[in-house]
Image (spheres, helix red, strand yellow):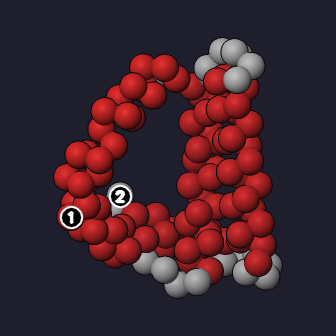
Amino acid sequence: MHIIEIQKFCSELLSRVTYPRVGTIIGLQEEVGKVAKIVMDIEIYGRPFEKKLFEKKCSELFFSFIDLCNSYDINIENVSRIRIKEIQKKIEGWEKEHSSALKNKRKKFD
C-alpha cells in the first residue's frame, strides 16, 4: 500500500468523527510524547526494550501524523519525494562535515 492510499483510508475512517483541525497537532504531540517516554525509559532508565509496545506507539504516532497532514490537504508521498531529492543533494556535504563526529557519538551512545 502506498502512503497516499493510507492517507485516503485514514481520511475515510475518520470522516464520521469531526473535531477542529487544532486537535490533529495536539494529538500528534501527545503521541510524540508517548514515543519519547519509551525511548527515555530505555536509554536513560535502562528499562528493557519491548519491541511490540514500541511498534504500537510508533504506529499511533504515524497515524496522528497522517491525520495532521490530511487535515491540511498535504500529500505526504509528494512532499516526501521532494524532500528526498533535497537530501540527496546535501548528503555528501553532511557526510564530509559530520561523519567522524557522528561515528564517535554512536560508539558512545549506542
Name the residue at 71% across, 69% down. Answer: 25
Q: Which of the labelled discs sits on residue 76, or is there none?
A: none
**Residue 37 x %, y %:** 74, 36
**Residue 70 x %, y %:** 56, 77
Give the distance between the C-alpha atoms of the residues marked 1 and 2, in whole angstroms.
28 Å
The answer to which of 7 and 27 lies nearer the viewer is 27
Q: Which of the labelled discs sits on residue 89, or is there none?
A: 1
Residue 52: quarter of image: top right
Q: Are marks 1 and 2 in contact (CB under 8 Å)?
A: no
The answer to which of 10 and 97 lies nearer the viewer is 97
Looking at marks 1 and 2 on the same chain, the residue that comes earlier in the sequence is marked by: 2
Name the residue at 33% across, 43% down. Answer: 98
Residue 11: quarter of image: bottom right
**Residue 44 x %, y %:** 70, 23
Image height of 85 relative to 75, above or below: above
Neighbor class of circle 2 (other Cα within 10 Å; few <14, some 14-19, many 20+) is: few
Neighbor class of circle 1 (other Cα within 10 Å; few <14, some 14-19, many 20+) is: few
| Type of amino acid at the residue the image marks with label 1 | Lys
Left or right: residue 11 versus residue 29 is: left
Name the residue at 61% across, 69% down. Answer: 67
Quadrant (top left, top right, bottom left, bottom right) of the N terminus: bottom left
Number of numbered discs overlaid on the protein picture: 2
Q: Which residue is mark 2?
A: 1
Q: Nearer the viewer, mark 1 or mark 2?
A: 1
Q: Secondary structure at mark 2?
A: loop
Image height of 26 relative to 22, above or below: above
| Type of amino acid at the residue the image marks with label 2 | Met
Q: Secondary structure at mark 1?
A: helix
